[in-house]
Image (tube, grey):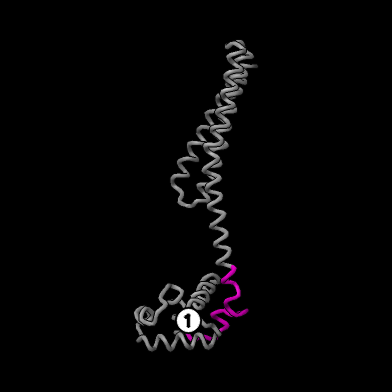
Amino acid sequence: MAGFLLATTLLTNLVLVGIGWKAWKFGLGISTRFARLQTAILILLCGYGVVASLQDIGVQVTRLGWIDEDVGRQFTGNIHVVIVLGGLAVLAPVLWLLRKLTKEFAHIEAVTDNLVGRLPDGLTVETAGLTPRERDVVAAIGDGHLSDSQLSEALFVSPSTAATHVRNIMRKTGIKRRSDIALLAIQANASS
């Protein structure tokens, strides 16, 4: 029975090492921080599983009488040290990444809260009564063409024509800034 448990523990170790290896390779190929965080947590769990399995092996080998009981206790004590140090070594970067992500999410939330309410309620490109050409101007502003000269190049019109379109869009929508027209374009893209 003890030999079966030992073999099962070794097999579990191999599986956990394989999962950790795959998670590490997956983490290298992913560019988002959240995916890297998930990978780091998975590797941490796999590493903990391997170390805990090694501790089980030490206990089982001691029970089988293959090693002296004092040596077995020392082995399991050393494994405890490895668990603590390894956990701290992996957990520190994970906590650093969580802190950084929390700051980024807080910044995104602050920006979003600032943008909410900038457009009049119920305003969409469809409800504003814009002409097709004015809709093109909204889309161009949403693509980052904010100045009259940029709009004229993107839409093949003169800068004064572009300025007239922008004034008409602002008059029809009640929008005061070009950046808010960009918000209207983002809203239009999100709804389509």
- Which residues make up the magenta segment? 113-131
Q: Position of residue 28 (x, y in %)?
A: 44, 44
Q: Position of residue 25 (x, y in %)?
A: 45, 41
User: Please, is residue 157 above or below residue 21 in the view?
Assistant: below
Out of 114 and 52, give the one closest to the viewer: 114
In-image side of 139 versus 112 (left or right): left
Specify the quadrant of the image occupied by residue 83: top right
Q: Any magenta on residue 137?
A: no
Q: Residue at x 55, y 61 (%)?
A: 107
Q: Which residue is mark 1?
A: 135
Q: Position of residue 188 (x, y in %)?
A: 53, 74
Q: Residue at x 58, y 83 (%)?
A: 127
User: Please, is residue 19 above or below residue 52 in the view?
Assistant: below
Out of 140 and 72, give the one closest to the viewer: 72
Q: Residue at x 48, y 88 (%)?
A: 168
Looking at the figure, which quarter contains the N terminus? top right
User: Please, is residue 144 above or below residue 25 in the view?
Assistant: below
Out of 185 and 90, give the one closest to the viewer: 90
Q: How many tags in the picture?
A: 1
Q: Residues within 10 Å of mark 1 (few under 14, many from 20)?
A: some
Q: Any magenta on residue 122?
A: yes
User: Please, is residue 182 above or below residue 61 in the view?
Assistant: below
Q: Main secondary structure of the magenta part?
A: loop
Q: Residue at x 40, y 85 (%)?
A: 162
Specify the quadrant of the image occupied by residue 164: bottom left
Helix, strand or loop at label 1? It is helix
Q: Position of residue 65 (x, y in %)?
A: 61, 10
**Amino acid type, residue under disc 1 in the picture:** Arg
